[in-house]
Amino acid sequence: MRRDVSIHGQWSSKLVFVLAATGSAVGLGNIWRFPYIVGEHGGGAFVLVYLGCILLIGLPIMMAEILLGRRGRQSPINTMSTLAREEGLSRSWGLLGWLGVVAGFIILSYYSVIAGWALSYVFRAGAGSFIGQDAGGAQAMFEGLVSDPERLLAWHTIFMVMTMLVVARGVRSGLEQAVRILMPALLLLLVLMVGYAMAEGHFMEGFRFMFQPDFGRLTGNSVLVAMGQAFFTLSLGMGAIMIYGSYLNSRASIAKTSATVVGADTAVAILAGLAIFPIVFASGLEPGQGPGLIFITLPIAFGQMPGGLLFGTVFFVLLIVAAWTSSISIMEPAVAYLVENRGLHRIGAAAVVAGVAWLLGIGTVLSFNHWSGYTLFDMTFFDVADYLTSNILLPLGGFLIAIFAGWRMTERSVMEELGIRQPLLFRTWYYLVRFVAPIGILLVFLRAIGLI
């Protein structure tokens, strides 16, 4: 049964939904993680595999998640319970909604801490702290930050409050107004960074690195990493896309809007690589530096290049904007549930979610310093939280979304909500969501838990 509008409101236009969903998808995974895994896995060949995975896994699952959200028009927990009841299925499917909300909640707790690093680096870049830094100095600067729990806690607090204030204002006044400003700003900042790379960096060297395939450097593990990145970069399986889909107009095409979001998210990841790699090459540094690429390698590069003070600051502002739009979407499902089921006002619900996530985030803060010696299976508190969400909860959520939309809902219900009139296009999507995407996600899951 189709519902016209969510009790929380509705996006004013399809464009706003695209901006919001793109903002949810575009985050630290695009601007921090994507460039360094491209560097680790050899460049162009990896990018080609990644793009294939986006089309075959990411896009079908995103369409399925939006479909479920718009049909249920509630928080992910209530949506899955309602749809299961309407389809004559077990009430246990409501656990899929809980799975996404819990995963998003845990992610928010440590995402805020990492985003706090970027907040700190905006001021470091603006103050000229990068100028003249060598590898040892950049490493010491980063280690000085993460070893100081009071500073980390302060930045974590500021970022969590930034997120809470937007979510508390609701769909139209909060989420929509934020993405209307932040997403164009993000794109502008990214284009500025690419322009800077073209002017000051070895742009063609970076371009060839990203787009000239060297299949000799591609391994089976690289393919699985590309699959995982394609899935995780789109914020799938954590309820964020489902709740944003619940605010989408009934007349909007899920296929077209999903394709637009996926295209925009991929474009941001590619542009981030084109902004970062030329700067890295121009400074004679290595692109395969792993997670330290952003917080250690790039500060060295910005400190050596003309205009580095300004553009180093711009880059970390860009990183914050990307993290902010994602954290807003991650907080929304839990807030929507509290409004629907506990009768809280949005302001109170946002404060509760932010407060509990903030408290949980203290564990991540301490895992980089005072608690660094306390481990479980050789993993710190942060490592456990990241592993649990990225390797277990999100893949499991995405897998179950594909199973529910592809195998448990009636084909009639799926066709009615999806609204694809061309039979060939519908059959292609249906095949991908029933067979290709679940198998791909299962392979990523088995790799993550060490079985392949």
Image (cartoon, rainbow, N blue to C red):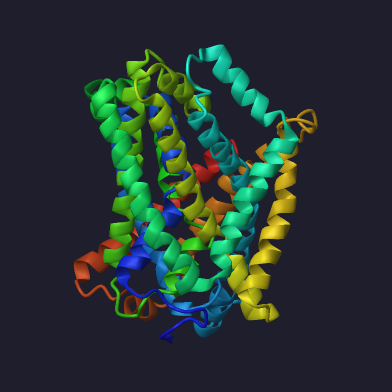
Q: Nearer the viewer, residue 277 or 430?
A: 277
Left or right: 113 with respect to 169?
Answer: right
**What quarter of the picture does the N terminus occupy?**
bottom left
Q: Position of residue 193 (x, y in %)?
A: 33, 35
How far across and how far down the image is residue 123, in percent?
54, 35
The residue lying toward the viewer, choosing from 330 and 391, is 330
User: Is there any visible trace of residue 103 in the rendered image?
Assistant: no
Name the residue at the front extreme: 127
* Residue at left offset 70%, top offset 65%: 352
Q: Is residue 215 above or below residue 15?
A: above
Q: Residue at x 21, y 75 (%)?
A: 421
Which image quadrant is residue 92 in? bottom right
- Snapshot quadrant of residue 382: top right
Q: Residue at point 50% right, 48% down?
A: 323
Q: From the viewer's perspective, is 13 left or right of 339? A: left
Q: Position of residue 88 (x, y in %)?
A: 53, 83
Could you tell me if residue 396 is visible in this image? yes
Indicate the position of residue 402 as horizontal and vertical percent values.
45, 62
- Residue occupying image coordinates x 73% and y 58%: 356
